[in-house]
Amino acid sequence: MNEVDKLSTKKKFKLMDAILTVICVVFVAEAAAPVASIGNSQFFWWILMIIAFLLPYGLISSELGTTYNGDGGLYDWVRAAYPNGKTAGRVAWYYWINYPLWMASLAVLCPDLITIITGIEFGSASAMMIQLVFVWLVVVISFFPAGDSAWILNGGAIIKVLLALIMGGLGIYGAMTHGVANEYTVASLLPSFDSNSLSYISVIIFNCLGFEVICTLTDSMDNPKRDIPKSIITGGIVIAAIYIFCAFGIGVAIPTDQISADTGLLDAMILLTGKTSGLFISLMALLFMMTLFGNMISWALGVNNVAAYAADHNDLPKVYAKRSGKNDMPTGAAVMNGIVATIVVIIGGFLPNSNLFWSFFSLNLVMFLISYVPIFPAFLKLRKIDPDRERPFKAPGSAGMLKVIAIVPMILIVVSIIFTALPLSFDAETLEATLPITIGSVVFFIIGEVIIHTCRKKHGAVYGKKSDTAINTDNL
């Protein structure tokens, strides 16, 4: 891409686009229902995670994103802190592999949503075809730059906020006219520490992640050092508000033990309106499906850039480094997304259809959360080894406070991974739900180690060289 093209793309991505992209990336409508199944104590967990995780993570992302604003995002941050090891390569692998798993989990929802919209029932073969169309449509759209896709990101953000407001509004209406499905008492609002509730805390953390994606789009922004902190702070406030409002609506409508992890939001709308079909429900299902596209496209922009950047530095196979000759987009990573998601969808067609969405989504959760663990110690190390670098945005606080805002979120991630990926009891029901996630996590861990070791051995590690570890600061 020539300099004129880059400048043209940059002019297309304004501050409001950045804010809406943060909302589109971070707010995940389909993840609201699993959290609502915790019950009324979800509000305690939401407030705790907003204070203990979302706020410090947002501050750290703002500082790292404006100080080390290379194309590799969180991979760049970890690579700058640990230039001679495999840590950054592992971050890139887990960050990338979660995406096709997530894409497959959302693809599973599409046939049911189309059935709600049209009333047409689909058999196994036709449902699989719909899922594959979803996967490859997302892949094709991700071939284009962020500026060209701004209308999708903006539209996705607006639709998500609209759905959340409608859900919360219906919840208020339902509470005033029909009462609440789950009685609100002081005891019910206190946190529950059973394994089911604790496993869903990982979804709350997942719902708070994604601020770093905006940091990979610096080449498409007019003024990244101004727009990144503003978009993260503004988007974070909006996201926290709409998550809680949407969760309230679902909790009002459906008894906790009856909330579906995949279609809970639509189920709540159906119960509160008393209609199982009709124009309103069809429209809500259509909007919900559109948010799935928004999720995938917004995340593709960040995930593919990270994968391509890691491949350029010999931490992932060179196929991920392949870029379009027309617009320099990472088409190799995008195609690999489609291939892996296709394999997962096909395998899913032969598995018991108990809850494929949650099975795929949980595995995606584990991979995704692992990729974030090194960010927090990297933040502390970069403050120590690179104290003189200009920081356009600097997380406030003393040295002791900085350790707190880095260590607490990291501990929360590790704990949530344990409760999601490991069976905490050995009864048949727990093993059936958790063991596939455990096995899948181990398999992808081994694959990642083999890939990283092979790439570094074949192409040679490029870490530790001054010219390579220096992070781009041209935009600062």
Image (cartoon, helix red, strand yellow):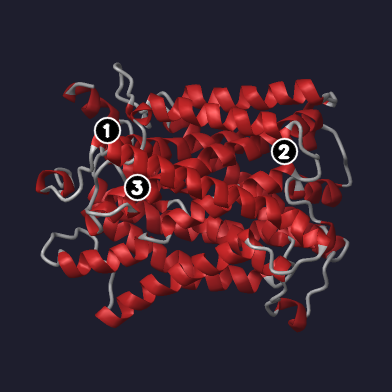
Front of the two marks 3 and 1:
3
Q: Which residue is mark 1?
A: 10
Instruction: Please report whichever mark, 2 or 3, sits nearer to the chain's N-terminal start.
Output: 3
- Neighbor class of circle 3 (other Cα within 10 Å; few <14, some 14-19, many 20+) is many
- Label 1's element? helix
Q: Which residue is mark 2?
A: 284
Residue under the image location 45 percent in, 51 percent down: 210
- Residue 17 seen anywhere in this rendered image of the structure: no
Instruction: Out of 336 and 314, give the one closest to the viewer.
Output: 314
The spot of residue 206 in percent (x, y) is 54, 56
- Judge from the rendering whether residue 307 lies leftward or rightward of residue 284; answer left or right: left
Give the farthest residue toward the top.
326
The spot of residue 131 in percent (x, y) is 67, 27
- Judge from the rendering whether residue 279 lies leftward or rightward of residue 445; answer left or right: right
- Neighbor class of circle 1 (other Cα within 10 Å; few <14, some 14-19, many 20+) is some
Q: CA distance from mark 1 to mark 2?
A: 34 Å
Q: CA distance from mark 2 to mark 3?
A: 40 Å
Residue 89: which numbered mark, if any? 3
Which amino acid lies under the numbered mark 2 shown in the image of this protein?
Answer: Met
- Label 3's element? helix
- For the N terminus, which image quadrant? top left
Image vertical order of residue 468 relative to residue 33, above or below: above
- Judge from the rendering whether residue 466 lies leftward or rightward of residue 398; answer left or right: left
Residue under the image location 28 percent in, 72 percent down: 396
Instruction: Please report whichever mark, 1 or 2, sits nearer to the chain's N-terminal start.
Output: 1
The spot of residue 452 in percent (x, y) is 37, 43
Instruction: Out of 39 and 430, give the one closest to the viewer.
Output: 430
Q: CA distance from mark 3 to mark 1?
A: 29 Å
Instruction: Please report whichever mark, 3 or 1, sits nearer to the chain's N-terminal start.
Output: 1
Mark 3 near mark 1, Cβ–Cβ under 8 Å?
no
The spot of residue 121 in percent (x, y) is 85, 25
Image vertical order of residue 376 relative to residue 469, above or below: below
